Image (cartoon, grey):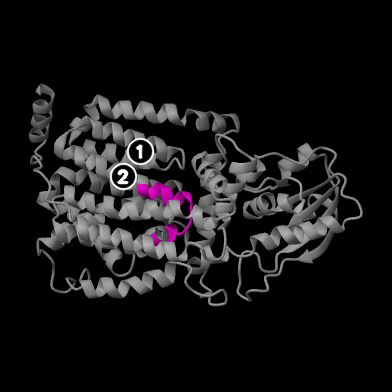
Amino acid sequence: MDDERASAAAVVDEGDPEPTGPPEFARLPVYAIAAAVGLVLLAVAGKFGYFGDELYFLATGKHQWAWGYADNPWLLPWLAKSMDALFPGSWFALRIIPLLLTSAGVVVSALIAREFGGGRKAQVITAGAYALAWQILASGHVLATSTVDPFLWVLVTWLVVRWVRDRSDWLLVGAGLATAVAMQGKFLIAFLWVGIIVGVLVAGPRDLLRRPALWVGGVITVVVTLPTLLWQMDNDWPYLLMQEVIKEQNARLLGGTLGTIPLAVAMAGLPIGAFLLCHGLYTLFRAPELRPYRFLGWAVAVVTVIVLVFANRYYYVAGMYPILFAASALRIEAGRTAAWWRWVPSWPVFALSVPVAVYLTLPVRPVDGFTGVDLVDFQASGSLGWPAVAETAADVYRSLPSRADTVVMGDSYWQASALDYYGRQRGLPQAYGPERGYWFTGRPVDTTQQVIYVGGTEEWLSQFFGDIRRVDTIRLPETTAKTANQGVPVYVLKAPVAPWPELWERMHRP
């Protein structure tokens, strides 16, 4: 009891009003929104095939298991391997996990609005905005780090926000456990905690940093993450190198640093999510009723700066969407909106946003109905033709006069994953790949003299092999659209220009 009174006194000393109990949870409408999202995702779960990243997790989980990989820890490969063991070859079953996480995120985002003091309307607006956020909906279709990570950010945020109200230290232990799980999928949640700590130091409640339960959660996170940290250490921290690769890719494809914030705002959903995002940040810093949670405004700012400096992936901030949605929804519910924009979070705009969000983010178009915009068609393009990749390589393999000292390789980690996952049942040996995480799974044996290579260009391959012969091209008869696998070349490579240990080092592409 003395500790609780001291905690409350600390809040008063910092000038923060003591939060009161939350309004009733709007169960029926919030659960209805979550169920609707789940049904939409269920309807498209069986479309096209495994996405490239899903294949990567499957192949590494089944055939190249490790406590860590160059671009992610072990959680996603383990989940993919486990689901494939229960439902072999079913991408539909695999996508039940992101479906459940996305639907659960709808509920937890509404609970954040409730903790802020939002009633039924604020909770429904927050849940609806989360459900229609383009990035959230798109990632809900595939098992990826960009699906698991945002949900765990939302969960941690809710636990911390609830702690501000009732000071139950078990909530901080729960936040530590959720953080420990998140760290097994991606290390990005460390950014969130840096933001929270900075925010608390600036705006309070500083008592958070004095709670032993917070540091117990930190110890749990470190202990659980130790195996993957040791793997990173043993392999010279390739995860840090990946951040430089990601920055280069974003600079080339998505406008670099200048494009990160506009994309993050747009992918919150137009017009509702984007507007609530901006208004919510303003509200967190200005609204008196949100003063106990002002540290979250600072957290959003700090995380955004960290992402801009170190990563540049716009979707790395998607886990912070509900904070801003909820803050904005609280003011909207109170009727404190300007006449010129109060139409934005209205039910007709929500209703019109549903078909737009579904059309732009989910694979609802036919195979020949792609828009031609890479960002819109990215998932569908990366989900077509993977069995054809393995089948074409297997045909080439079977046609060789001699298969002794022959290996198969995929130019991208997606192609290497397809060769490993689909190729073994077609008689192909273990696949290798020079890109990203696949390079770390092993190299061809020293006696290798011949390589069936899927993808790449003759110009790049000529650095490593003296004899390059293009023998086939992957064709997808079901579509004429541009996809990740349409028109991909297949080569037979001979005469390696150096011993394999040296050659493998030179071929490595982060």
Q: Which sits in the foreground, 10 or 37?
A: 37
Going by the numbered disc 1, the residue's amino acid type is Ala
Q: Secondary structure at mark 1?
A: helix
Label 2, label 1: how far apart the Cα atoms are: 7 Å
Q: Where is residue 239 shown, x and y percent of the image?
A: 53, 40
Label 2 vs 1, first from the N-terminus: 2
Q: Where is residue 287 shown, x and y percent of the image?
A: 13, 53
402 relative to 180 in the view: left or right: right
For the point 35% across and 34% down, the residue is 177
Going by the numbered disc 2, the residue's amino acid type is Leu
Q: Which sits in the foreground, 250 or 328?
A: 328
What secondary structure is the magenta-colored segment mainly?
helix
Q: Are marks 2 and 1 in contact (CB under 8 Å)?
A: yes
Q: How many marks?
A: 2
235 relative to 174 in the view: left or right: right
In the picture shown, does residue 341 fall above or below 84?
below
Whether residue 277 appears in this view of the structure is no
Whether residue 429 appears in this view of the structure is yes
Q: Which residues are magenta?
A: 137-151
Q: Residue furthest front?
A: 86
135 relative to 406 in the view: left or right: left
For the point 50% across and 31% down, the residue is 229
> Residue 178: which disc?
1
Q: Which sits in the foreground, 254 or 493?
A: 493
17 relative to 39 in the view: left or right: left
Q: Residue furthest top?
A: 2
In the picture shown, does residue 177 fall above or below 144?
above
* Residue placed under numbered mark 2 in the picture: 155
Q: Residue furthest right?
A: 401
Label 1 packing within 10 angstroms: few (<14), some (14-19), many (20+): many
Q: Secondary structure at mark 2?
A: helix
